[in-house]
């Protein structure tokens, strides 16, 4: 639609964004979409944060030079409403630790919709606490291991919760959580032989990929979760590259799109989460050379927002925290395949 069709408020936003964008480009301003308008608003906010942060630093530096006095860290900057902390992100570690610790014991009623993701909740919380440098207490660790043991299926693998069917996603979450806890009880919790047998049953021999559960859909999530669990359980060498990993590289290559990213399945759209899973799966089974790695690196780099710095998950989508993890996390994995990247670039 033309600019004339945009509501008055929308035109005001466009004018403001055009004035603010300068060196960041104004492509598409004549044909705004809901997504592009939201993106411009976000970039405007991000640039304002940067502007106030830089202004704060300059004023403090100039004040220090003018009077020779030491900087008062409690002094509020006149250029920044609310001071420095209002213009930059601050990680409130203790608040996060308190929230996560409480959540291991009790979640609000709204979390009932995640009943099939209870292994994931354990992993997310335990891993987040580990990243924050907060060790689990012995009793808490023991309780988490005991709960996860209830989610383990007698025939191998883990379900999303007690009594649920085994599925590769919660199997990955449970095994990764137990590996994070790393106590004797955690190591003994997994029935290794049955779990590896479950992984083998999920193998889709017709494509080389993995089904998320027996009889389920085949996609790149299955490839990554299966091979990651195998590696965590100590499956290595030819058992991983030629056994469980056989055909995975070819399957992931079929999922790589014309853009360079990787889709969940052949013919679908390149997607941040699936790209990480596909790339990581290929690296785990020494098949990264199956992919067009220079094009993959190009697609990943272009997912980063030029102003806000985070990543989006698909072309022409907004930046968000979830995709910043998947896309950002793909670069260290890509670095692990740096030899294959350099060979591909000739």
Image: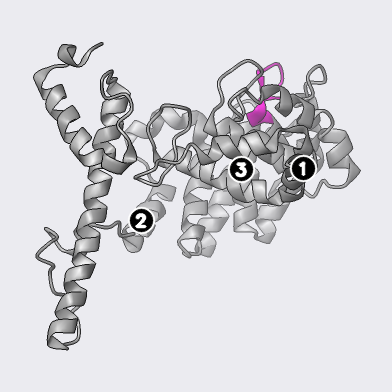
- Residue lying farthest front? 23
| Residue designated by label 1 | 346
Q: What secondary structure is marked by label 2?
A: helix
Residues under labels 1 and 2: Cα distance?
47 Å
Pair 1/3: label in front: 1
Q: Residue at x 40, y 28 (%)?
A: 317
Q: What secondary structure is marked by label 3?
A: helix
Q: Position of residue 113 (x, y in %)?
A: 41, 27
Whether residue 268 sits left or right of residue 199 in the image: it is left
> Residue 110: which quarter of the image?
top left
Magenta stretch bounds:
209-222
Q: Tell me, yes or no, whether the two marked residues, 1 and 2, touch with CB atoms within 8 Å.
A: no
Mark 1 vs mark 3: which is more N-terminal?
A: 3
**Magenta-colored stretch includes residue 217:** yes
| Residue designated by label 2 | 96
106 vs 330, nearest the viewer: 330
Mark 3 vs mark 2: which is more N-terminal?
A: 2
Residue 249 appears in view: yes
Whether residue 13 sits left or right of residue 32 in the image: it is left
Q: Say if 158 sits above or below 207 in the image.
A: below
164 vs 253, nearest the viewer: 253
Whether residue 173 sits left or right of residue 83 in the image: it is right
Residues under labels 1 and 3: Cα distance?
41 Å
Q: Position of residue 101 (x, y in %)?
A: 40, 55
Q: What mark, if any, has residue 174 been given in the picture?
A: 3
């Amino acid at each position: 639609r033309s600019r004339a069709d945009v509501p008055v408020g929308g035109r005001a936003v466009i004018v403001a964004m055009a004035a603010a964008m300068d060196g960041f480009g104004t492509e598409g301003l004549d044909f705004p979409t809901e997504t592009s308008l939201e993106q411009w608003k976000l970039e405007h906010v991000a640039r304002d944060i940067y502007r106030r942060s830089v202004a704060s630093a300059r004023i403090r530096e100039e004040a220090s030079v003018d009077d020779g006095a030491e900087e008062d860290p409690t002094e509020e900057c006149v250029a920044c409403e609310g001071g420095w902390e209002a213009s930059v992100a601050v990680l409130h570690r203790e608040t996060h630790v308190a929230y996560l610790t409480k959540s291991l014991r009790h979640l609000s009623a709204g979390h009932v919709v995640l009943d099939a993701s209870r292994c994931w909740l354990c992993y997310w919380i335990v891993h987040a606490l580990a990243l924050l440098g907060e060790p689990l207490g012995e009793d808490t660790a023991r309780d988490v291991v005991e709960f996860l043991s209830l989610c383990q299926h007698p025939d191998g693998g883990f379900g999303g919760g007690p009594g649920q069917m085994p599925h590769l996603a919660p199997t990955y979450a449970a095994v990764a959580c137990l590996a994070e806890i790393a106590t004797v009880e955690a190591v003994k919790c997994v029935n290794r032989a049955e779990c590896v047998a479950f992984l083998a049953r999920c193998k889709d021999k017709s494509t080389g990929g993995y089904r998320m559960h027996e009889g389920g859909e085949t996609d790149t999530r299955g490839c990554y979760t299966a091979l990651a669990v195998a590696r965590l359980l100590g499956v290595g060498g030819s058992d991983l590259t030629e056994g469980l990993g056989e055909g995975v590289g070819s399957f992931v290559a079929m999922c790589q799109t014309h853009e360079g990213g990787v889709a969940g399945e052949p013919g679908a759209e390149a997607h941040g989460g699936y790209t990480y899973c596909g790339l990581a799966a290929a690296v785990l089974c020494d098949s990264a050379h199956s992919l067009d790695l220079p094009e993959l690196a190009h697609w990943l780099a272009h997912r980063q927002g030029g102003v806000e710095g985070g990543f989006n998950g698909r072309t022409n989508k907004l930046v968000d925290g979830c995709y910043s993890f998947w896309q950002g996390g793909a670069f260290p994995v890509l670095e692990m395949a740096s030899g294959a990247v350099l060979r591909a670039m000739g």
